Image: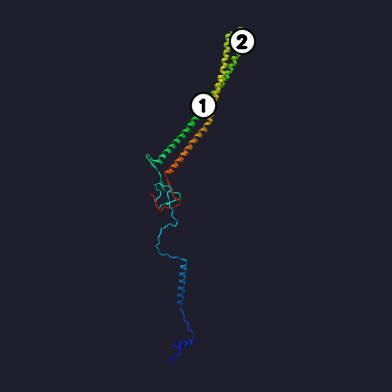
Amino acid sequence: MTELFRRQAVDHQRQRFHGAIVLTRSPWQTAVAVFFVLLVLALVAFAVTQGFARKESVGGVLMPAGGVLRLVAPQAGVVSATPVAQGAHVSAGQAVVALSSEQSSATGPTQEAVARSLALRQGSLGDELLQQGLQVHQQAASLDARVSAVAAGVSQQEREIALQRERVQLVRDVAGRYPELVRSGAVSPVEAAEKQTELLDQQARLPEMERARGAAQAELATLRADRASLPLQARRESSQMRREVQALAQAQAENESHRGTQVLAPQAGEIAALLAA
């Protein structure tokens, strides 16, 4: 006869009367479970906070972290010098490449010929400045000597004029007595006439001496004016020559700038490559 319920169900129903089945766990199982939980948490934290590296092939160009500066020549020319070598460290403003834009003609480099001509002119002006200083010193000494001599001559002429005036007055006094002497017969009329002629001669010399003194005084005034204006004239001439020297120096600098230029480093760094020859 077939049973109404399966045997397993009947047995399960019977076991309920004996109580619930409880499975016990050992301590090492708990420790293993805690270890794996902590390991999973550590892996999750590492994945969140840390990165990882992997190999990958990409196309492109490697660039330094600070960037690359490409220096271009400001004008066309020929590389005359490379003061720094490839891989060297340079500071800001240091020359990296020197360029020459020298042009040549049938007689040789044009700018070099101009530079020589300017240098010769500068040397000539320097010599002229030196000579000008020496000449001014000599002129000052000569003018001082002439002023002293003319001043002494004027003083001598003034003394001679004073003596001549006394002489004229003396002759006039003597000639004034001759008419009475002629009337008294002490002297002849001829002697009286000679004395009068002498008076006229002495009187005529006095204006000549005064004119000579006037000319000497005018010469003395001119010499003193020349001596006073000599330093000013010397400064004016030297200033003119110095301006010419400065103009030549500027022309020399412009000529040198036309002859060549330098490519300077805009900031400190390392020379990666020199593509110049």
**Residue extending furthest bottom?**
1
Q: Residue at x 40, y 41 (%)?
A: 110
Dividing the picture into quarters, in which one does residue 61 lie?
A: bottom left
Q: Which residue matches tag 2?
A: 179
Q: Nearer the viewer, residue 142 or 221?
A: 221
The amino acid pointed to by label 2 is: Pro
Residue at 43 percent of width and 43 percent of height? 258
Q: Residue at x 57, y 14 (%)?
A: 200
As drawn, the label of residue 249 is none
Residue at the limit of the structure toward the front, as seen here: 106
Please give the residue where the numbered disc 1 appears in the rendered image. Answer: 146
> How many numbered marks does the figure carry?
2
Kind of element beneath mark 1: helix
Q: Secondary structure at mark 2?
A: helix
Q: In this rendering, is residue 3 above or below 54? A: below
Disc 1 to disc 2, how far (Cα)?
A: 50 Å
| Res 121 quadrant in image | top left
Report x, y in % for residue 84. Answer: 40, 49
Please name whichever residue, 170 or 79, is drawn nearer the observer in this view of the structure. 79
Q: Are discs 1 and 2 less than 8 Å apart at CB?
A: no
Q: Residues within 10 Å of mark 1 (few under 14, many from 20)?
A: some
Identity, as a three-letter code, of the amino acid under mark 1: Arg
